[in-house]
Amino acid sequence: MPKYLIQATYTADGLKGVLQDGGTGRRQAVERMAESVGGRVEQMYFAFGEADTYVIVDLPNNVASAAVGFTISASGAVRTKTAVLLTPEEIDDAARMEVAYRAPGA
């Protein structure tokens, strides 16, 4: 199952929710969200800095990932960035793949 890294930054209202629910309450909500699209949470961390939360999730596909991102962002309580995570073996496969490409101006 593909892995995704979701970086989340809470709005002021989102932070009020974290203060109310606590970290474990937010983790449970994120776990339910992932399970609702056929995925699972591998890890979830709160952090200081640019993002407030980092979540590694296994999701069935990019469509499920997009649905999760749309739903989270539409809440207005959280802004997210999502990155597809690749294993070293997937990078090996990509490096061996033949690609027909012509650089601009070449």
Image (cartoon, rainbow, N blue to C red):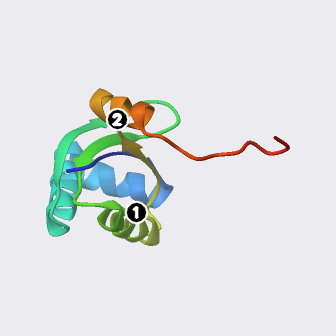
Residue located 37% across and 32% down the image? 91
* 102 lies above or below 74: above
* 28 relative position to 14: left or right: left
Given residues 54 and 4, the one toward you in this image is: 4
Q: How many marks?
A: 2
Q: Earlier in the sequence, mark 2 or mark 1?
A: 1
User: Any mark on residue 98, and which?
Assistant: none
Which amino acid does the dot numbered 2 rest on? Asp
Secondary-structure class at tag 1: helix
Given residues 30 and 56, the one toward you in this image is: 56
Residue located 71% across and 45% down the image? 102
Quarter holding residue 45: top left
| Residue picked out by circle 1 | 69
* 91 lies above or below 58: above
| Residue picked out by circle 2 | 93
Residue located 53% across and 36% down the image? 50
* 37 lies above or below 7: below
Which amino acid does the dot numbered 1 rest on? Gly
Q: Mark 2 to mark 1: distance in Å?
A: 28 Å
Given residues 104 and 37, the one toward you in this image is: 104
Label 2, residues with CA under 10 Å away: few <14, some 14-19, many ≥20: few
| Residue 9, position as x, y percentages in the image | 46, 48
| Residue 22, position as x, y percentages in the image | 23, 47
Quadrant in which the C terminus is drawn: top right
Residue located 20% across and 59% down the image? 34
